[in-house]
Image: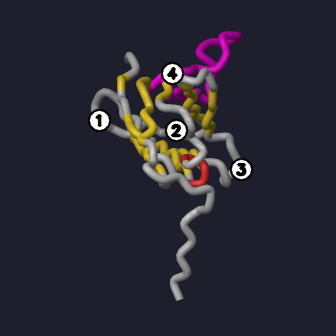
Amino acid sequence: MAASKYDFPIEQGTSFKISLIYKDSEGNPINLTGWCARLIWKTNTNITQIFSSDNIDYSVYKFIIDDINGKLTLMIPSSTTNSFLFNNAKYDLELQSPDDLYAGGGKYSTRLLYGTVTIMKRFSQSNNALDCNNE
């Protein structure tokens, strides 16, 4: 199946979360046990950034796979989006199976989505994160 085009905005300096469920042609979630995911983009300033489900440094982003439910969730904290100085980026979202395509052919890989990420710039930018004390 061909990848779908999906464009989305990210508001600079705010927390960002995007989720999707990978389904088969009958609308059933695909079991993603053992799979890995990667969202890679190239900005209009020619910077390439990779967000991988293998990441363990959650201070920059968290990309998780809910295996049995076929759900992918990418979360980017406000401290990271605040540093996005580009205007837009072209991206691809890919999945890789733990199984080989065929013996010697490498892992089965597929592109799910592609499109443009647009950064919605802040009118005022602060290097300090919002820190509310709820006492």
Label 4 element class? strand
Q: Residue under label 4, please give it.
A: 110
- Give the quadrant of the N terminus: top left
Is residue 43 placed above or below 37 in the rendered structure?
above
**Dot 1 amino acid type:** Gly
Mark 3 residue crowding within 10 angstroms, few (<14) / some (14–19) / many (20+): few
Which residue is painted at 56% across and 54% down in the image?
Answer: 77
Q: Residue under label 2, please give it.
A: 32
**Looking at the image, is mark 1 or mark 3 earlier in the sequence?**
1
Q: Do the residues labelled 4 and 1 touch (CB within 8 Å)?
A: no
Q: Which residue lies furthest to the left in this view?
A: 26
Which residue is painted at 62% across and 12% down in the image?
Answer: 102
Label 3 element class? loop
Front residue of this view, candidates 86 and 78:
86
Q: Residue under label 1, please give it.
A: 27
Q: Is residue 40 left or right of residue 120?
A: right
Point out residue 81 in the picture as x, y percentages from the top left corner: 55, 47
Q: Is residue 90 left or right of residue 103?
A: left
Q: Give the residues in magenta.
A: 90-112
- The color scheme shown is secondary structure
Point out residue 80 in the picture as x, y percentages from the top left corner: 60, 48
